[in-house]
């Protein structure tokens, strides 16, 4: 009997056995400081550079253009702050669909007087409005950057990256893509070919927590958000962990083809959504192209965060929104951009792994039925 089902893969993923093995080997054999020039240090450095090469290959970029960071949040911070240095104010284009590590940085840049932020319109489909982007590019002055995710973290909606890159390219506007929720889940190589900076996160593709990457075009200059040592070309001071880099590399190599396995989850998701709709739930972005493993459902009469807690007691792990905003009953900014303020508090995100089964769906729906049979929270 299944006693618990995990449907929160957009929050984090279980590390691959090969990742754990690679990290264990690194911790045992390459624990020296990779900045040291002696043999032990060089051994540690080799594992880091091997991992860097694997991460670069995932997005078809040279290893020299891969900057290791602590996570995707740090990578997004570096990308946005690089576009708006002290004393030079310009326009940032983005939307409320983005992860908090983009939207909150945008807000800070505006408060600091570095940027004017044009919040682009979001369609009811969960897509960025390409027509509004085109209008903004034509009307806004000194546009320094478009920050656009590849896949939305709450709805799974695949954003119009190719159209956005084309429009920005015609006007010489750089594009930053947060690809954390997309890599390893959908094919991306062609979409990222002309992108200036790309954020990746290891733990979303079955690697370790504590490491991410900002990948750039060749010759792209970055500004550090931290100062200190000369590690990572002085852009990210602090000793790089060979174990984390090695684990990230193995996960990245696996992610090169993992989207094939994720594609098979679409049929399992279709069954889940059929059952949810039959129970009166609404699926956000259902008519849009989505990553095949994500369902965002609106549950009438229930606060999403409270429903998550109730389902946890039934053995089902999922989220009501981005894990970085978990535990709040405030409306999801992402859903608020798509639906009414009331409905924006009622989201429930199911995100499955490539080994999801129809039995998992049956377990999840049975747990939901038990909870929904009780008095709604509001």
Image (cartoon, rainbow, N blue to C red):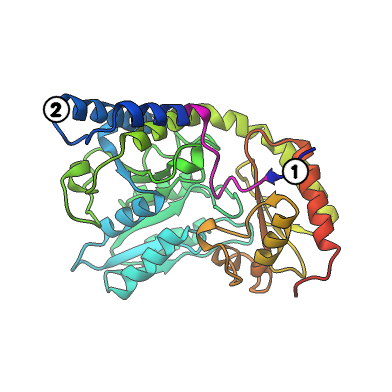
Side of 131 where 283 appears, left or right:
right
The image shows residue 5, relative to residue 318, as above or below, that is above
Residue 280 drawn at (x, y percent): 82, 60
Residue 268 drawn at (x, y percent): 74, 38
Side of 335 where 87 appears, left or right:
left
**Quarter holding the C terminus?**
bottom right
Q: Which residues are magenta?
A: 6-19
Which residue is located at x 41 percent, y 59 percent?
102
Dots 1, 2 in contact, CB < 8 A: no
The image shows residue 101, relative to residue 36, as above or below, that is below
Q: Is residue 331 visible?
A: yes
Q: Does 224 appear in magenta?
A: no
Local crowd size for mark 2, using a 10 Å CA cut-off: few (<14), some (14–19), many (≥20): few
Helix, strand or loop under label 2: loop
Which residue is located at x 69 percent, y 36 percent?
356
Which residue is located at x 55 percent, y 39 percent?
14
Side of 318 where 68 appears, left or right:
left
Q: Nearer the viewer, residue 140 or 343?
A: 343
Label ID, residue 225:
none
Helix, strand or loop under label 1: loop
**Quarter holding the N terminus?**
top right
Local crowd size for mark 1, using a 10 Å CA cut-off: few (<14), some (14–19), many (≥20): few
Side of 112 where 164 appears, left or right:
right
Q: Does 12 appear in magenta?
A: yes
Q: Nearer the viewer, residue 194 or 82?
A: 82
Mark before the other along the chain sequence, 1 or 2:
1
Pointer 1: what residue? 3
Residue 110 drawn at (x, y percent): 33, 72
Label ID, residue 38:
2
Residue 285 drawn at (x, y percent): 66, 54
Q: How many marks?
A: 2
Task: Report how far apart the C-alphas of labels 1 and 2 lie in the structure.
Answer: 51 Å
């Amino acid at each position: 009997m299944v006693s618990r089902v995990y449907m929160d893969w957009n929050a984090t993923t279980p590390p691959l056995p090969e990742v754990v093995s690679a990290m264990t080997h690194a911790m045992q054999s390459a624990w020296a400081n990779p900045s040291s020039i002696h043999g032990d240090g060089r051994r540690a450095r080799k594992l880091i550079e091997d991992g860097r090469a694997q991460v670069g290959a995932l997005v078809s970029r040279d290893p020299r253009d891969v900057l290791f960071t602590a996570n995707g949040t740090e990578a997004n911070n570096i990308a946005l702050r690089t576009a708006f240095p002290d004393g030079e104010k310009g326009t940032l284009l983005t939307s409320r669909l983005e992860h908090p590590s983009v939207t909150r940085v945008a807000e800070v840049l505006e408060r600091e007087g570095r940027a004017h932020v044009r919040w682009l319109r979001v369609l009811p489909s969960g897509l960025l409005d390409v027509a509004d982007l085109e209008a903004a590019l034509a009307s806004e002055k000194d546009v320094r950057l478009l920050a656009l995710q590849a896949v939305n973290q709450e709805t799974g909606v695949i954003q119009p990256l190719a159209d956005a890159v084309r429009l920005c390219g015609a006007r010489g506007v750089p594009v930053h893509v947060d690809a954390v929720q997309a890599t390893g889940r959908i094919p991306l190589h062609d979409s990222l070919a002309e992108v200036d900076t790309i954020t990746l996160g290891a733990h979303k593709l079955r690697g370790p927590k504590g490491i991410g990457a900002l990948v750039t075009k060749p010759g792209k200059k970055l500004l550090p958000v931290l100062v200190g040592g000369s590690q990572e070309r002085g852009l990210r001071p602090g000793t790089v962990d060979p174990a984390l880099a090695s684990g990230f590399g193995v996960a990245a190599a696996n992610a090169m083809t993992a989207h094939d396995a994720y594609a098979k989850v679409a049929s399992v998701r279709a069954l889940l959504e059929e059952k949810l709709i039959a129970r009166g739930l609404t699926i956000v972005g259902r008519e849009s192209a989505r990553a095949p493993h994500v369902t965002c459902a609106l549950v009438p009469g229930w606060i999403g965060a409270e429903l998550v807690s109730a389902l946890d007691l039934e053995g089902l792990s999922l989220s009501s929104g981005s894990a970085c905003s978990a535990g709040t009953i405030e409306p999801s900014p992402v859903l608020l951009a798509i639906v009414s303020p009331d409905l924006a508090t009622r989201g429930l995100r199911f995100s499955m792994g490539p080994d999801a089964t129809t039995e998992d769906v049956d377990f999840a729906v049975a747990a939901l039925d038990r909870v929904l049979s009780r008095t709604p929270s509001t």
